[in-house]
Amino acid sequence: MAVSRRRVLAGAAALPVAAGVLGAPSAQGAQAQTSQQQGFRVGVGISDVTGPAAENGMMGYSMPQQQTAGIHLRTRARAFVVDDGAKRIAFVTADLGALFQSVHQGVMRKLKAAYGDLYTEQNVLLNATHTHSACGGDSHYAAYDLAILGFQQQVYDAHVDGIFEAISRAHANLAPGSIRLGRAELTKASVNRSRKAFDLNPQADKDHFPQAIDPVVTVLRFSQNGVDVGAISWFATHGTSMSNGNHLISGDNKGYAAYEWEHDHAGVRYLDGNPRFVAAFPQTNTGDMSPNLNLSPGTPETEFENTRTIGDLQFRAAKSAFDAAAEAVTGGVDHRMCYVDMSDVAVDAKYTPNGRPQRTCTAAIGVSMLAGSREDGPGLPLPEGVKNPFIDWLGGIDAPIPQALADAHAPKVIAVPFGAMKPYPWTPEVLPLQIVRIGQLHLVAVPAELTIVSGLRLRRTVAAELGVPLENVLVQGYSNAYSQYVTTPEEYDSQQYEGASTLYGRYTLPAYQQEFAKLAAAMKAGKAVPHGPTPRDLRGKLINFQPGVVFDSAPAFKAFGDVLVDAKSTYGRGEQVAVEFVTGHPKNDLRRGGTFLEIQRLVDGKWVRHADDGDWDTEYHWARTFVAESKAVVHWKIPPNAPIGKYRVVHFGNWKNGWNGAISGFSGTSRTFVVS
């Protein structure tokens, strides 16, 4: 979800990447590269999870007017499978705003049908990068579909199918390999956007983060038979470099970091089959970490460069840690997972700040969540006088707030009691909690976004229970479900955006500490854990008020694919090509795993694909021009290293017949132009 509105001290802004981080690999790292231990089988895979490129609400800023109108970077799921001979785990990071429980359930059903009990909710960890420029509408809980006007089946299918395909490809890619661990620090890709709340924490907690940010970069380097095939790089910063005024699908800064590593440095071409290198950039405890270093959202003039800059910093820090990774990952893999009703946890006194037993409560959001954001973008807008048919269908938001619930959430002033809505709660109560171990590294998979201090406390709890160093425990946020924020009790009291978005009351974090301690103790003892309550299956319970495609028509005397505005005859490097075509609605065919455009280059007398709609230098824009008529505008900013030669722009699309509903494909081609 979108971020806070608070004024934050600007003093924690950018500092350089730690000295030595971007240097050459150490001798120890080079030695590790030549003497790998083949203790694992590892596999990597990638797939497209891009949803409808037009007229679909985006997930993150919760603004109904922010609907897709094209593609800048396709969103992708990146999967890693690790097998130690006795156990295996599958880890997936997807370029999504959140990994909803509905999607987790859908992926598990597909994995069960394909692989039986090989991949289950126990050993599969799904998480999201938290980009705010991906399609929304794939949750079975109403709170996350409000701004999208309901549940979007196309989005849900794209996300579930894409994640399943990524895991399947990693499964098929399994081969003997090794994993090494690297670390770095990055201090100019995040800023604390909730400093007022952060400063309420005890000094010992604040001392752990002297710049009020979490600068740690942790990298796993995956090799097969001595050849590098992938990397997972954890770092905490929000996916809000692209602003709430953006309408192009984008993986935001983490999507760019992955693209830069895979495409620019490893030579990956996404339409040419499973890539030989996969780079994932998951989140950690990102709740109060903003990429907007000036504590102000980007603008149409700055947001693309903001995205590239923050993404590039993450890539460079990750690549440095990767190159210098000298610590062999050993000890196999393990996992523990259970479900907990987070709305009703009796919390032992040992986990509470005042040393008294406490209890979580029915989910509710506070008034300051609705007030909007200053640093990254507005929150969930529910203004008076604005009609939303989805809210009306749900029965409105005027649910009564019992005094007992108000008291339980104090000092939060409740705006909407999500957990008390009818006929179903608007947010989940039963949530998946999971710990995944990859050698000495332990991932605490939380279905929420934690502030850095709440993450620190949870890590300390798990590390103490396991008896391992703190640096070997990471919070893996946005995992397997989504339930908004988790703050410390002290931060909660300030009721900034994050505290107002902490659903289950002041003692949400202590409840997580207690329940994850149980998982950690079971893992250390080699014991199983009870499954816990079964989460709701809400398939078919929500409807969609977002208009679909009735039919497409071409302007008079025009056909689909015709060029409306053609390319010039010549361009120089650094210039931008723009071509407009008569087109159909992108919802007719998402072209997932494909493209709406190609920049083709003439090579030895044949036209070959040079770039597509998954490339940073291209933009695919869609716009409705009249009732059922629309146009596609293809932009290509010619990079400075583009080969000199002849090019053309090709657009692919589909149109829907109004008489019989048939959907037909078409293409259109610009004139040939020269890049000189």
Image: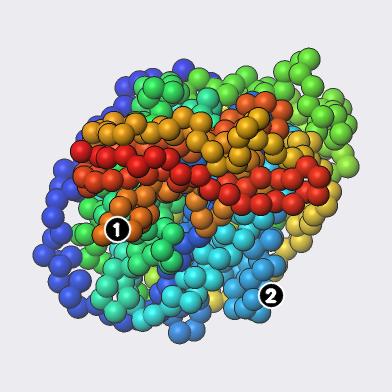
| The N terminus lies in quadrant | top right
Q: Nearer the viewer, residue 395 or 167?
A: 167
Which residue is drawn at the image coordinates 16% and 43% (left, top)?
A: 19
Which residue is drawn at the image coordinates 29% and 68% (left, top)?
A: 228
Q: Quadrant of residue 247?
A: top right
User: Mark 1 or mark 2, which is nearer to you?
Assistant: 1
Q: Earlier in the sequence, mark 1 or mark 2?
A: 2
According to the picture, the residue beneath numbered tag 2 turns out to be 113
| Label 2 residue SS | helix
Can you give x and y, in whole percent of width and height, for residue 516 in the image? 57, 57
Q: Nearer the viewer, residue 160 or 513?
A: 160
Q: Nearer the viewer, residue 652 or 536?
A: 652
Tell me which amino acid carries mark 1: Gly
| Label 1 residue SS | loop
Tell me which amino acid carries mark 2: Ala
Direction bottom: furthest residue: 85
495 in relation to 185, above or below: above
According to the picture, the residue beneath numbered tag 1 turns out to be 605
